Image (spheres, grey):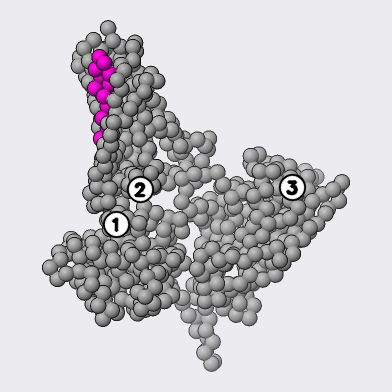
Amino acid sequence: MNKLIALLLLTLTAATSQGQHSLKWGKPSKEEIQLKVCSFDSSANAIVLAETGDIKFINNFIYLEIYRKIKILNSKGLDYATIEIPYTIENNLEDIQNLKAQTINFENGIPVVTQIDKDQIFTQTPEPGVKEKKFTFPNVKDGSIVEYKYTIVNQRFYFLKDWHFQNKIPTIYSELKAEIPRNLEYNVILSGKLLLDKYNGASPNDNKWSLNNIPGYEHEDFVYCYKDYINQIQFQLKSYLKYDYSRVNNQSVLQTWDELVAEVTEDYSPYLTKSGVAKDLLAQIIDLKDSREVAVKKIFKFVQQFKPAYYSWYKNQNISDLIKSRTGSSSEINLLLCLLLNEAGIPANPFLISTKEHGKISKHFPHLNQFNHVMAAVSEKDSSYTFLDAVSSSSNYHLLPSDHINYWGFILDGAHSRWLKIDYPTESKENYLVNYNLEPGGVKISFCGKYSGYFAREKREDKINNTIKEPVFSLENELIKKDSSSFLNLENEYEDYTENHYYSSSVRPAGKLFLNLNLFELQNPYKQKERQFPVELGFPYNINNTIYIKLSPGDTATVVPKNISIALQDEGIQYGKFIYRTVNDKNSIRVFIKWEMSETIIPQNYYGFLKEFTNKVISKLNEPIVIERK
């Protein structure tokens, strides 16, 4: 009897769970109609009730039928009533068919359906090679259910469309089915904790995957590409059966990186073998007497004039058209850079990468679509490599765009092709010296800031855009006048950038003098209670600042912050450290501040420690030094 009751309860539970969402067009379930708050995220303004993907192979085409249903929980969720569906039109790769959308409202319990007309669906071109269908559901308000369905048709057998089980807003149910023919075999790549936990990294026999109650990710800062961490499935063609008269052969597809090298090298050959074109250009760019360093700078500066229209690893136009138009894909521009460097006797090879916004690279499969950019890898005498990227906005070729330093890249060098680690090529340092000269009749302050690497790049951009953030000095609301400023190496990005500011006050405040050392009013940017994804910093950095306070006769420092030294580390990895030290004598006070962040990715389970570490840093910077006069 007990077993029978348990079985009935199990059946009832399963039926109830299944009844919470409906996959039928225009027929939301009772639970969906009554839903007002997401049970696993009460802060959600909208929620994906259900979504399905169904992959089918029909007559040499691949059809991905997609259905998605969303509920608007409150007025803040109205943004999710606008839908954008991108698709690749390059080489007629993809097309959108059978797009339908409608809004369902409920008046006195009766559903009122408003369908979208075809003329309310717009086709846009956000970037070359890509189009998108865009529409906004009509008559949407609190409690509306909106749903849409469409089919993506493509001929891309090599890589099927990725399926993301996780959306920016919470998702109650997400499902993907793939009816893969027997003559095709794919590598199925599962990623994301929920998928890996449920399927143990393996593909089920029925080629169906589903997840329930999946959290959203719209409120996460310091994440370059959510695709790196969300629950998703990717497919890559592994092999196919080829029918050759009476025989059936199993043909492998890009099973090794060597095969990928051969394919991409052949594609790049029309650029890299144009020696005549290169000679003509070099005659206008460099002199025979130029050193290697000077020649690299000149070639880089020349190619940097070409404007990138979009990012890609492949090329679309020939080199003559590129030179004529001065516009091309990011790969075309850097392939030209490789060509010119090689012709000048400076060995350079194409270097496939993925930008941070495009996502991290997996070394496990020769998956071409994971790359979206090409740089030039220049071979040095010590067998190391210098990476150059002509689409950088910096005139310093050493200073790669920080978004392009995504840990690993793949160099194309024939039999020597391999993975190379990309490190930050220059240190990013901030060093400033502040001098307070406290006099009986006034105060003089000088600030000298010296910046290198990405700090220097940011400061230069602030100066060019007139958005300089100067240090804030306060002497009990007394007016501090800026006397002058000077800037060094604003245009020469191969040197450190320096800013000098001079201030003075003709009034010395009576009584206590409070000196705040948080000169740039820094605040803790980590405000979330919990973290779903790792924290990704733009670049590692090293801050070393010194504050020197010269006291006048009769001045006494009555409050001086205590020294501290704290580290952010876990299991032998030091992510950062902070040191605050003061030296107090009769005539002066010196404060030494050192703040380093040596790692750029802090795991999500260490987020609480990062938040507390930064709180301590900011709190210490906010502690004033108090000066009293006798």
Label 3 sits on a secondary structure element that is: loop
Residue plotted at (65% across, 64% down): 122
Label 3 vs label 1, nearer the camera = 1
Q: Which residues are magenta?
A: 437-450
Image spot of residue 306 (x, y percent): 36, 67
Residue 395: assigned label? 1
Where is mark 3, residue-wise?
141
Residue at image mark 2: 464
Residue 252: x %, y % from top left: 46, 77
- In the drawing, does residue 493 fall left or right of residue 468? left
* Residue 418 appears in the figure: no
Question: Which one is nearer the viewer's eye here, 3 or 601?
Answer: 601
Residue 110 on image: x %, y %: 86, 51
| Front residue of 276 and 31 | 276
In magenta stretch: residue 439: yes
Q: Earlier in the sequence, mark 3 or mark 1?
A: 3
Q: Between disc 2 and disc 1, whose residue precedes?
A: 1
Q: Quadrant location of residue 147?
A: bottom right
In terms of image quadrants, where is residue 629? top left
SS at circle 1: loop
